[in-house]
Image (cartoon, rainbow, N blue to C red):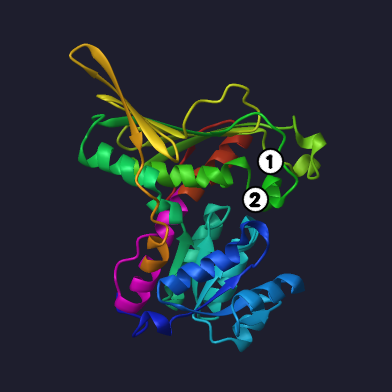
Amino acid sequence: MKARFKKAKDIKVGVVGYGGAFNMGKGHLNEMKHAGMTPIAVVEIDAARRKVAEEEFPGIETYSSVSQMLKKSEVNLVTLITPHNTHAKLALECLSAGRHVVSEKPLAITTAECDSMIKKAKQKNLMLSTYHNRHWDGCILTAKKQIQKQKLIGDIYKVEAHMGAYGQPGDWWRSSKSISGGILYDWGVHLLEYSLQLIQSEITEVSGYAKKGFWAGKTAWKKDTNEDEALATVRFKNGTWLNLCVTTLDSNPKPGQIEITGTKGSYIMTGTDYTIVQHRSGKKIVTSGKNIANKWDEYYKDISSHLSKGTKLTITPEWSRRPIHILDLANKSAKENRAIKAKYS
């Protein structure tokens, strides 16, 4: 691909969403600035938060709507930091207006939404990506080195990814099924993105399971509350399988976040460390260690390089679509009580 801009600083960037939760608007703008790009715009419906943005980035343009920014601003790249169910609509609006787009994860909620976004980006010859900064988490970087390069556990044949424990979900939008997509769409997307880096094979079939209703009456969302627990089981063409479970109802949760099992051992991964269990000469050998540091700044460096130097994009929309397709099929499978074949556009 040819470079779109002569220099990284020529890429004028903006964010949609400057809410107080995690102060992600500030974080994204600083990361883009660190990658050499130029922050110029913020869209935020809350006037108080717009004022905070103006204080934290003196001289920055602030707008109360995306349409207003697209009409008045010279922004080239827009990052969407909004609830999951708004990603597709806002991305299509920005792409249609000729802007490159980064969406916070997940890319969207359904496969159809992802496909419409990908189609529009191709029609407009624009970049579309998802903020999978955890692609560069120390835990997965360490795991890939030891599993793929050093072959410490042999050939992978299953992956067990899990998150959660026992506890009532909060009343924020991430606990709403219609807004968030469901319990699997927050941390579950990260766990899938890790897993898909390790299982390098085509998805063939997905089964979904869900327990609902226990917490619903106690939350602000009532019937629209996320599942209490959900499970996605994924089959791959090479025979490997993956289980993803996220729960608020497990009194005895498994340790770690992901356990990767191979023909010569198991690898238990957490955010900070790892444990490898192997069998050698009839003996069980257990070794542990710390993961390398996270390299989150690589995400926007990759975006900047792609747009200004024409380098290959790491987090393509097609890559971002894969976990969403799994979760979309898992939702349908849970409703229909049957496994569903994967589909590719």
Q: Residue at x 46, y 71 (%)?
A: 32
Q: Reply above or below: 146 against 108.
A: above
Q: Residue at x 67, y 36 (%)?
A: 227
Q: Nearer the viewer, residue 139 or 339?
A: 139
Q: Position of residue 307 (x, y in %)?
A: 37, 76
10 Å crowding of disc 2: few (<14), some (14-19), many (20+): many
Q: Residue at x 61, y 30 (%)?
A: 165
> Where, by quadrant of the figure, is residue 240 drawn?
top left
Distance between mark 2 and mark 1 Cα atoms: 8 Å
Q: Is residue 260 magenta?
A: no
Q: Which label sits on residue 199?
A: none
The answer to whether 150 appears left or right of 91 in the picture is left
Name which of mark 2 and mark 1 comes first in the sequence.
2
Q: Is residue 311 magenta?
A: yes
The answer to whether 122 appears left or right of 19 in the picture is left
Q: Position of residue 126 (x, y in %)?
A: 43, 75
Q: Reply above or below: 12 against 265.
A: below
Q: Reply above or below: 119 against 339.
A: below
Asked whether the beta carbons under mark 2 and mark 1 sit within 8 Å of each other, the answer is yes
Q: Residue at x 75, y 33 (%)?
A: 215
- Can residue 342 be seen at all in this image of the molecule? no
* Three-letter amino acid code of the residue under disc 1: Asn
The answer to whether 335 appears left or right of 35 in the picture is right
Q: Which residue is mark 1?
A: 226
Label total for image: 2
> Where, by quadrant of the figure, is residue 303 drawn?
bottom left
* Three-letter amino acid code of the residue under disc 2: Ser
Q: Which residues are magenta?
A: 302-322
Q: Which residue is mark 2?
A: 180
* Tag 1 secondary structure: loop
- Can residue 5 be seen at all in this image of the molecule? yes
10 Å crowding of disc 1: few (<14), some (14-19), many (20+): many
